[in-house]
Image (spheres, rainbow, N blue to C red):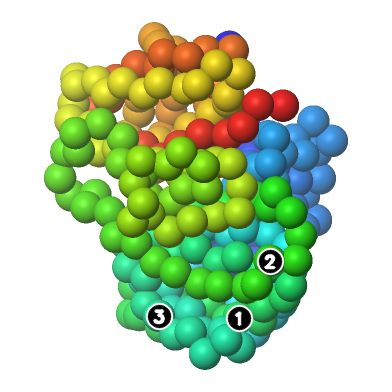
Amino acid sequence: MITVTPFQKFGHQDHGWLNACHHFSFASYHDPQRMGFGPLRVWNDDHIKAGTGFPQHGHQDMEIITYVRRGAVSHEDNLGNKGRTEAGQVQVMSAGTGIRHAEFNLDDDDLDLFQIWLVPDEVGYPPRWDTRTFDRDQVSDGFVTLVSGRYDREDQDAPFIHQDAAFVAAVIGEGESVAYTLDPGRRAYLVPARGEVEVNGVPVPERGSAEISALTELTVKALKGAEVVMLDLPPE
């Protein structure tokens, strides 16, 4: 089963410096029908103006993935980590027992990113932060694993999360297709970061989403050049 939600149907909040789109209930946006998808609790599509950002604040017991689509985000936390994550890169933060961090767009251009929160498989992990780069300017040979907590994960170099899930990405040329196999019972949440695709013949618009369940073989076809990110999630 594939359930598609277009970008326009998500929650939207314009704070001036931040134009936020919420795939699921978040902050003052609440939809009891959209509270998450398995351990996936938050998928925010954020546009952050130059010279602005989130001052220091805290998180606990959440696995947080940030995928930068345009621009760069600068991170600093109370563990001493400092980093600048650019377009095509992904940063991962395990909040665990507690972490305080700030994230700012220190560049002259606006910033676009996806911020994704997953509930961990247990509480009380040590907090941590890590990054990885994805070449989003070249057509990829299928999906590339960027982050994984799968116990049998193939890419041991991918930053890990404390959840039986994997965050994967693919760049697909116009008219081309890539395949992906889900283990029986697993689910997926797919978002075209740019471009429109078809998943097993079902159209998914740019920055919309597809909730995928009860399927094992996926064929993702780009109707025009596309960049696709997806979470491979555990069974219910």
Q: Do callouts 1 and 3 mark residues in contact (Cβ within 8 Å)?
A: no
Marks 1/2: CA–CA distance: 17 Å
Q: Residues within 10 Å of mark 3 (few under 14, many from 20)?
A: some
Q: Is residue 123 left or right of residue 21?
A: right
- Identify the secondary structure beneath mark 3: strand
Q: Earlier in the sequence, mark 3 or mark 2?
A: 3
One can see residue 225 in this view = no
Name the amino acid, label 1: His
Q: Earlier in the sequence, mark 1 or mark 3?
A: 3
Q: Residue at x 55, y 16 (%)?
A: 184
Q: Would you name the residue on which mark 1 appears?
A: 101
Q: Would you name the residue on which mark 3 appears?
A: 83
- Identify the secondary structure beneath mark 2: loop
Indicate whether 103 appears above or below 211.
Answer: below
Q: Would you name the residue on which mark 2 appears?
A: 125
Name the amino acid, label 2: Tyr
Indicate whether 225 appears above or below 86.
Answer: above
Name the amino acid, label 3: Gly
Q: Residue at x 52, y 42 (%)?
A: 151
Percent from the top left, x then y, of residue 25?
Answer: 75, 46
One can see residue 222 in this view = yes
Q: Earlier in the sequence, mark 1 or mark 2?
A: 1
